[in-house]
Image (cartoon, coloured by chain):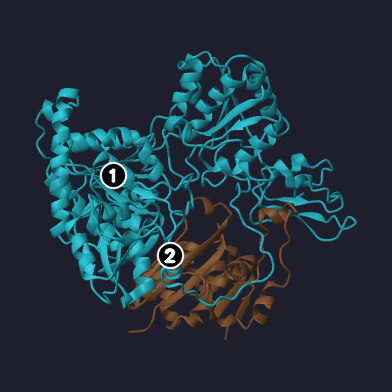
Chain colours: A cyan, B brown
Amino acid sequence: MKTLMLGNEAVARALYEVGVKVVSSYPGTPSTEITESVTRYDEIYSEWAPNEKVAFEVAFGAATGGARSFCAMKHVGLNVAADPLYTASYIGVNGGMVCAVADDPGMHSSQNEQDSRHHAIASKTPMLEPCDSAECLSYTKLAYQLSEQFGTPFLLRLSTRISHSRSLVDTSAREERPLKEYKKDVMKNVMMPAMARGRHKVVEERTKAIREWSETSGINSVEYNDTRVGIICAGSSYLYAREALGERASYFKLGMVNPLPIKSLIDFARHVGQVYVVEELDDIIETHCRKHGIPVIGKLLLPVCGEFSQSVIREALLGEELPLIEFDQPIPPRPPVLCAGCPHRGLFMALKKLNLYVSGDIGCYTLGAQAPLSMIDTCVCMGASISGLHGFNIARGSEQAKKSVAVIGDSTFIHSGITGLIDIAYNKGFSTVIVLDNSITGMTGHQNNPANGLTLKGDPTVAVNLEALAHAVGINRVVVVDPFDMESTRKAVEAELAIEEPSLVIARRPCALLKTVKHNPPMVVDTEKCTGCKSCLRAGCPAIAVHGQANKGRGTAVIDQNQCVGCEICAKLCSFNAIGFKE
Amino acid sequence: MSQPVKNIMIVGVGGQGTLLASKLMGKAFVEKEFDVKVSEVHGMSQRGGSVVTYVRYGEKVFSPVIEKGEADIIIAFEQLEAARWLPYLKPGGILISNTQKIDPMPVIMGNSAYPDKILPTIREKGVQVIEIDAMALATAAGSPRATNIVLLGVAAHFLGFDKEVWLEVIRTTVPPKTIAVNEKAFELGFSAKQ
């Protein structure tokens, strides 16, 4: 039976069908739902790892042990896992292993727009790229067969549109795979220089063999229509090109994007007129074609930046634009905001008066960069808030350290914040680090993590004790505050900033969206007392606005009774005692 | 069944329940043996940002996205979002809009103005606009959270098959506890547009 599945769900389904035993991942949009969907299948062991490097190594260890294994991550996650990836490529696998990496063209939910095909090329790891959910399923299954046939881990390249689009999938039953035998093999599995030299040659030979396979296996498909125009493409770019150009062009659709074929591309180019390469992000296929003497047009017409669509291709290649109906008044933007009742808002409001340099990190709290909170100075990558703050303070001196903090979430702290904290303690730094512990990995949609005491499947487990951990690495000053108590939070941070030694402040309150959190009733505005001064709006809460013409045109505060969860932050900002709970 | 691909966009504010509406549509079209693609937005925009879901169905669907000038129907959960995504509507297309207004942060802060008379302005451009206070009907059905199902009830008039198909899909998709409320919300939406 055909079912409608997200690309991510289809990858998970393939893992089930192809007999995968071990899955380890770190959440990251748009890859997260693969691993969440795996929890439906009791036959597969699945876990959240503290970061992508650990996840990759767990999966690689399982493959070495003879099981079929898997890990998933977003594009920037593969940077974290790049270290094991590059050497795993040399060692190769015993049981099949696939690592799914989801790019985010258009940066719907990411800090950069990197093209993960570069990692495949640089690590000499073969990579498949599906274009819809059906291919997510069939390519994932194929990747396991090829992984074992050629003895290499495989990369599966996804993107936001593939991961988060639903299309039709044909499912089948699971095939159990017995564990493969593990045999000690130092020359293959221990990568010291003498052994690695030998393995590098194996990798080069393997790449040739896989390229040859890709030329003849049918993984790359050709559709001849009008032969005056030929399009070389892969993944979602194929869908956009096919939609925009229909039968006005012929298509070479690559299923394997590393290594790229040579002979079959040359053959295609001979059978068509002008050849265009349509690829999102970087000009990898285009450069490959040029290197092998195929005259193609690509980035000359098509953008490097941003996500493609049928209209990007229609406009670039055909110069056609569709007629539009425009709304002719200015439309205010609607950026994402911290939710009503978000504990991060309390922390930022507490810090607001201190006029600090705030070294930021990756998570919901990055939204604190936007007006009216405007509290974040930097955001680079997972964990960089802490190490970056240390460098900033070393460069600018101990007086600066009294005016600067790092903010980092619980999950991000475990991922790679702890190493920065060790650096501060070890090197006698004096920075103040704030962990925003909301008991969940928030931005990716509520995943459990090693600090909240629950596994991927929601089973109780040990929780990292952040206070004890900080003490253990040599941070002597550790304080815990409730971010909704803004006064005490501010005082605690001020006290730690004043002292010339490193400290960890833990701002602890669970995410307002957690089902286990009990909320207060919504708050109401006493219109007699409200003066329309707008002090309450400084919190940037989506549940409160000032409307109407009362108070000589200044208006009156109005609280959305559906959104408000009674966190009382706005009430604490009101000098007229106009916000409270219903009597 | 060789009809051209139909494009439906569902637009709104993160947290309004647009994803359930697109999931129900996807299921209904699969039941009717169409090829279907539904493209969703997860992650950052779900935190109160502007969100859009594309639903495409027909004999064979390639692209998962809908571009400017391509949508046959836009279902807007909020008026400002109706205005924002209007250029995606095909000339001659239909706009179904909830009358609810949600101020975005720049409006709350007084840095931008929420445009006046959005739906009449769109209607003046010759667009067929169906406006409905879906939240009031959802509340009448038992929960303001069923706003999405009220809007689906309105849209059902333009999606080419019997309302029983929709009710069946709703019954088999939503949590059992909410079936009665959602059925009622669908009926109220369906009869609001006669």
In the figure, is residue A463 to the left or right of A349? Answer: left
Q: Quadrant of residue A268?
A: bottom left
Q: Quadrant of residue A497?
A: top right
Q: Secondary structure at mark 2?
A: loop
Q: Nearer the viewer, residue A313 or A318?
A: A318
Q: Compared to A451, does A218 lie above or below?
A: below
Does the rendering let one see residue A63?
Answer: yes
Which residue lies under the disc numbered 1?
Answer: A120
Q: Nearer the viewer, residue B179 or A566?
A: A566
Q: Position of residue A527 (x, y in %)?
A: 83, 54
Q: Nearer the viewer, residue A249 or A294?
A: A294
Residue shown at 64%/40% (left/top)?
A: A345
Q: Amino acid at mark 1?
A: Ala
Q: Position of residue A82 (x, y in %)?
A: 32, 36
Q: Secondary structure at mark 1?
A: helix
Q: Position of residue A81 (x, y in %)?
A: 33, 36
**Mark 2 vs mark 1: which is more N-terminal?**
1
Which residue lies under the disc numbered 2?
Answer: A309
Does the rendering let one see residue A459?
Answer: no
Q: Quadrant of the N terminus of chain A?
A: bottom left
Q: Are discs 2 and 1 both within one chain?
A: yes
In the figure, is residue A76 to the left or right of A403? Answer: left
Kindly report the distance in space between the C-alpha atoms of the residues bearing marks 2 and 1: 25 Å
Q: Nearer the viewer, residue A73 or A204?
A: A204
Q: Compared to B84, does A122 lie above or below?
A: above
Q: Compared to A244, does A50 lie above or below?
A: above
Please give the chain letter of the residue carrying mark 2: A
In the figure, is residue A421 to the left or right of A461? Answer: right
Q: Amino acid at mark 2?
A: Ser
Label 2 Cα crowd, 10 Å radius (few <14 / some 14-19 / many 20+)? many
Count of picture labels: 2
Label 1 Cα crowd, 10 Å radius (few <14 / some 14-19 / many 20+)? many
